[in-house]
Amino acid sequence: MNRALTMFFVCATAIGAAFVLSAQENDNATAAEGTTDGIDPALVKAATAKPAAKHFHSLFRLSRADANVMVKLPRQQEFKEAKEGKFYPNGATFRISGGATATAEFEFGKDAVLKTSGDVEFGTREVEYGTQPRTVTLTRGVITVSLPRTLPTGLFSVAYPNFIVKDMAGESRHELTPSGDGDEAVVHVVTGMLALEGAHYKVARMSAADKVRIRTTGEALFTSMRGEAGDYKVSLDQGTTTYRDPISGVVSNQVRKLDFSLTPQCAIKIFRKRSQVGGRMAVSVMTFDPSGEMRNRFTFAEGAASVNFGEEVVRIQDISFKTKSDKTKDASKKKAGEGESSESSSAESGSGGSSSSDESGTGSSEDGESNSGGAFGDNA
């Protein structure tokens, strides 16, 4: 009897709990649909929305160090020894030394890693708490950045002294070598993609295996870009020009761009000079194909549509220059060639006739000779 009562109470409790859970689920669904009286549907939607994906840690960690690693924290003047496994704030600067075999690894997120090779100096830019984008400032050395292939654009960048690599995803290798009058940089996409932007040039997309070498002088008065691997478009500034609409007659300034394919051994050279009068920047750009021949050249002044000119350079061997005398010579040569061909055909026919006369016997041969004589007499 007691056992039967116990089973009855257990079943009744289970049924009651099921009814309570069902009622709670219905209430939650009604609130999520925005039908709850007195509650703004937008607020309900915001409260029930999934949180945005977090790609990076608030701080980044020195996860491994096989070298001497020094760190300078934000708003400090001295470098101190960095400790493996410790987190550091954005805005810190690191110096890694120990020779060509020295390596270190920094973890920015679960799948975001930066590895150094050899002697390297780099830093990070400070960000507001809770914001996503991260920027690494490279001063010298070689770093390799590994990011998720699906990382959204605009979240990770590598800033060089004279240009910036942005919209990164996948793995890429970055090298910067300072010199006495500037620096030389090499950007190599291993997997994934990235974009690149500098003064008067822009690369919208570099894909896997693409590689570029960029040389810049200290005052950024000269930039040289050379294709090392791959094929990608470089958008070059051509200044502004004045355009008059043929229908409305409205005059406006238009920004001009030149898209140049940078393949291996192709080169782009950009010269800059600040004008003493007016202070405008004058820019001269030249492009070269793999054989070293110039393909484009143009010059413009920033913000001055009246100073803008350029051209596409066509190689001399691609053009056939013909003068009137050359055409006359070609016509006479052609006529002489036709005369020689007719004479050779006549000689061939004459030799054929004598051959047939010899074959036909003595009498035929004499007839042939007399006919030949008559012919020569007529010609005379």
Image (cartoon, rainbow, N blue to C red):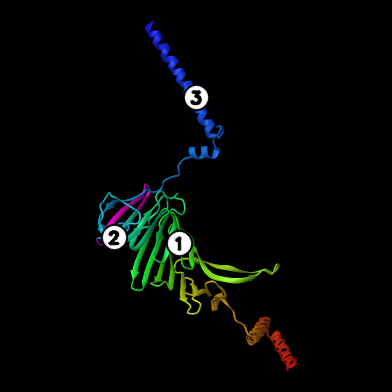
- Three-letter amino acid code at the position of disc 1: Leu
Provide residue 313's location: percent of width, then percent of height.
54, 75
In magenta, the rendered stretch is 98-113
Look at the image and tell me in which quarter the N terminus lies. Answer: top left
User: Secondary structure under badge 3?
Assistant: helix
Instruction: Give the residue at x 50% y 24%.
Output: 23
Provide residue 371's location: percent of width, then percent of height.
73, 88
User: Secondary structure under badge 2?
Assistant: strand
User: Secondary structure under badge 1?
Assistant: strand
- For residue 196, the mark is 1
Q: Compared to 7, does 67 lie above or below? A: below
**Mark 1: few/some/many CA within 10 Å (<14, 14-19, 20+):** many
**Mark 2: few/some/many CA within 10 Å (<14, 14-19, 20+):** many
Instruction: Give the residue at x 54% y 40%.
Output: 42
Q: CA distance from mark 3 to mark 1?
A: 56 Å
Viewer-side label of 3, 2: 3
Instruction: Give the residue at x 34% y 50%.
Output: 59
Q: CA distance from mark 3 to mark 2?
A: 61 Å
- For residue 22, the mark is 3
- For residue 95, the mark is 2
